[in-house]
Amino acid sequence: MANMPLQFKRDRELVMRMYLTMFLLGVLYAFFALVMNVGLGVGMVPIAIIVGVMVFVQYMISDKLIIWSSGAKVVTAEQEPELHAMVDRLAHNAGMVKPKVAIIQSPVPNAFATGRNPKNSIVAVTTGIRERLTPRELEGVLGHELAHVRNKDMRVLAIANFLVTMTSFIMTMLFWSMLFGGMRREKENNGGAMMLLYLITVVVYFIGQLLVLALTRYREYGADHSGAEISGDPGALASALEKISGAMARIPEKDLRKLQTASAFLLIPPHFKGDDMVHLFSTHPRVEDRIRRLRELEQRARFGVQ
Amino acid sequence: MGLFGRKDKEKVEVQDWPRLSTIVKVEESLRQREEITPARTAGVLYRHSDLNPFLKDIETNMREALNTGEGATQTGFRFKDEDGGLRWAILEDTNFRDLASSTYTAGNAIASNGAKDCLIAAVFLFNFTHSVRETDTRSFLRSYWIYRYTRHAYYPFVPTSDKEGDRDRPSELELARLVHRAGLEVDRELEEWRGLWGIPF
């Protein structure tokens, strides 16, 4: 799962989904191991090797999985000359190998980079983000994505996720082993120790999750900073974030006149939810914080303050 | 008293005036703080139809509604047609309270004469004397405040050109915050903030 979406909106939801995936993968591996151990009598060492191979394969093909699941289509320089020229220029500025370029047919404005190393990386943008942003702003966004690639964030995150997956695996194994007395151990002797071990794993698992969250956030700020260096224009990403984050993205493009059909007046009267109040009067704090930092960088760049 | 004078508004339509009129207090407070220049232009956008007797003879009917009788104002008005059978009633008054009242009356006159479904929006023009974003150094910001009759609430609209989709969203959000604090009934469903590109005033 080594992808680094730009995380403009619903960032928390995305992170939660990522954790859930990691947790469920751990459960899946544990289930797999249990079936082999209890059902087929395979020893723990071969199981560990098999699971290790599976995790490695998952890591190796993760970029393909992401491309496949997001519906991104890799495009050539002939198909998308402008986009390619932009990535060319940025990759040159960053002193890195140019990643593949892909487009996702989606009205939702977003972008991501993926790949376990710069050589195998891909940057993808949605059609929605291209429609919304000016070339300058899109360049800011792509700079941010290339920074993720250059900083090897996908690998860092993949390793962190691997550890979370493994903790989830061990946690589930211990839980089932206590429940069924499985794994062919004598439960009378080590029941208490097993319980303690389980509790420790649970604590480690949750701390691990918090650390990954902090790590992701930290890498995101890092990519903002080095992305600004790559594009040479901190204000471009700030302006892109302003345009497509949270509240901004909800303001429509369409003209009110187009809504005026007879049925429009039969609509249920609007109800004002408390939640909307939050949306209107506070954009996502983290995005606001990112914009603030980028604007500071912009000011420094403009006035030469160090 | 005119048939559609201000005295009638409580009888015919009680829902719009309390919400639409919140703009009067807001204009006063912003003007006193010199955040805006005095606002004196507004418009009502509606779908025109000659099949409706009131709309067919709207010029005379509007004059009667606005400028005669007990609740009369000195509000000037003119009409401007758009493609697609839409028409603007553009109102001007140096007294903003009268302007808001006349804008309400104009919409109400159309609504209470069998053309409620033809009403689209009332729009007020506020010229701010400063930008509302740190990075924006403009000393002037033209903003429209759109009141949609189907939603009974306002939202800001700052077009950056006449092309559909070109709008200054960051400024709109800042303006919404500012004006909500001043007491305006702002539509909280941002998805409903549909623009009106090419407003003729």
Image (cartoon, rainbow, N blue to C red):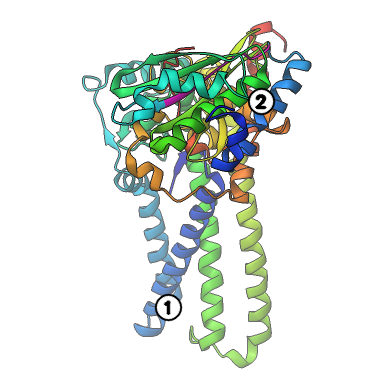
Residue at the spot of label 2? A293
Residue at the spot of label 1? A34
Q: Magenta stretch: dominant SS?
A: strand
Q: Position of residue B38 (x, y in %)?
A: 68, 12
Pick the residue in front: A187 or A285: A285
Q: Answer yes or no: are tags 2 and 1 on the same subunit.
A: yes
Q: Which mark sits nearer the N-terminus, 2 or 1?
A: 1
The residue shown at (41%, 17%) is A135
Label 2's element? helix
Pointer 2 and pointer 1: residues touching (CB < 8 Å)? no
Q: Position of residue A296 (x, y in %)?
A: 68, 19
From the viewer's perspective, is A140 left or right of B172?
Answer: left
Q: Is residue A47 above or below residue A143?
A: below
How many tags in the picture?
2
Q: Position of residue A75 (x, y in %)?
A: 25, 28
Q: Is residue A189 above or below residue B10?
A: below
- Taking the image as drawn, is residue A237 in sight? no
Q: Quadrant of residue A82?
A: top left
Q: Quadrant of residue B131?
A: top right
Label 2 sits on what residue type? Arg
Magenta segment includes B43? yes
Q: Which residues are magenta?
A: B38-45
Q: Which mark is residue B127?
A: none
Q: Quadrant of residue A262?
A: top left
Label 1 sits on what residue type? Leu
The residue shown at (28%, 30%) is B51
From the viewer's perspective, is A19 left or right of A267?
Answer: right
From the viewer's perspective, is B150 left or right of B37?
Answer: left
**On the rendered image, what quadrant is the N terminus of chain B found in?**
top right
User: Mark 2 belongs to which subunit?
Assistant: A
Q: Position of residue A227 (x, y in %)?
A: 53, 24
